[in-house]
Amino acid sequence: MMRAQDCFSEESMTFLTKILQRSGTGQATAWPPSIVDCLKTNKPQDRSVENARAESKQVICDVIRSVLNKTNTNPKDIDILVVNCSLFSPTPSLCALAAHEFGMRSDLASYNLSGMGCSASVIAIDLAKSLLKAKPGALALVVSTENLTQNLYLGNDRSMLLQNTLFRCGGAAMLLSNRRRDSLRAKFKLLHTLRKQGVDDESYECVYECEDDQGNRGVRLSKQIVKVAGKAMERNFTALGPHVLPISELFKVASTMVLRTVIKKSRILFESLQWIKLSRLLPVIKPYVPDFKRGIDHFCIHAGGRAVVDGVGDNLKLNDRQIEASKATLYKYGNTSSSSIWYELEHIRLHMGYRKGHRVLQLAFGSGFKCNSAVWLCLQDGPMPDKDINKPWDHTKAD
């Protein structure tokens, strides 16, 4: 598919092949029809608006149809519609496309979110939550997807080539309700949503849509992205901790913070009095990293790449079982952007045996730079897990 674009140098092709082999994605991930057609015609991709709209229409309509059928919901019962798609924002909007295809009501409150990156689904859920609070007895439909037709990078800048190896087609639709009667059939209850936005230069520029020196449009990934993501996650988890951690963990965090403050002020005092030797005797107390596994039963880490999943897993001290949903999603579907956390939730539901009362954390990163999280309470027991499932993703590990 990449050679058919007739624009990549041999050096770039070697780089793409190397990155793809290490990406943690399998052989069955989905590309849009216009890119797949390149295999048949051996000609460059048709990047027209109509092809891009056709990709979005197929994905959006399929996932909406699926959730409406599974919940036996009439499209005219939908009060609120939120669609997020970062890189494709046509006129009419994707909300208008969905409302038109399914014949939704004319007084539908619809919201189209674009440019919000891979963490946009949590933003969409947070928006739906706020709208439902203001409208009792309502149904909200949230659709998360991304569009690749017009977003294949056709240049040779390595910092922009990475997007060609990870992103794949995908989407998810979720139905949220604040109607009392729906509490009897709901699978999850939303407990918390938390959004943290970086506003410094590094955060703003680390995932940046631009053109290269030859005018080819793409998304540039900064070398600082790992550091920026780490800071964003730290801010998010610092605010999330009081909502999900047990008192014993909160006490350890608080006591460590007090001790670090006392030692810091003592060191400043001793140095001001020229008691240098005494100052050096003061111990260095590292910040206490709380054990979020004591407050969360299942983790949905955005499948942004093998290194992202392994990095977050290492920071949270998660074992292979606890990051299985993310690695399985990356292997089977690739990085489907904002919808990946829902593929992971479905993997947990089908294969990891969640139980009523369990809490699930969804964690996603996005351009800007954002780290967003949502915590869900399981209201029903899931099916018994299939212990014999083949797990080829277990053999992938970041270098």
Image (spheres, rainbow, N blue to C red):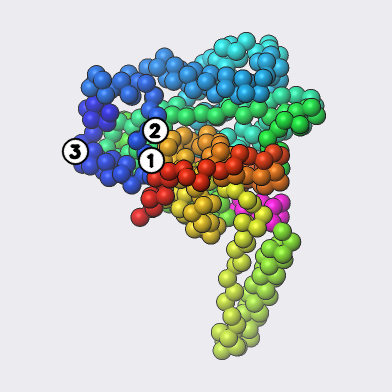
The three-letter amino acid code for the residue at tag 1 is Thr
The three-letter amino acid code for the residue at tag 2 is Thr
Circle 2 sits on which residue?
A: 29
What SS does tag 2 mark? loop
Circle 1 sits on which residue?
A: 25
The three-letter amino acid code for the residue at tag 3 is Glu
On screen, residue 1 versus residue 48, left or right, reads left
Give the position of the C terminus as an image quadrant: bottom left
The residue closer to the viewer here, 204 or 87, is 87
Give the residues drawn in magenta, as a range.
Answer: 235-245
Give the position of the N terminus as an image quadrant: top left
Q: Is residue 106 magenta?
A: no
Quarter of the rendering containing residue 384: top right
Disc 1 crowd, CA 10 A, few/some/many (<14, 14-19, 20+)? many
Which callout, 1 or 3, points at the residue further toward the start of the chain? 3
Q: Is residue 237 magenta?
A: yes
Is the residue under label 1 in contact with that under label 2 (CB below 8 Å)?
Answer: yes
The residue sitting at the front extreme is: 388
Circle 3 sits on which residue?
A: 10
Which callout, 2 or 3, points at the residue further toward the start of the chain? 3
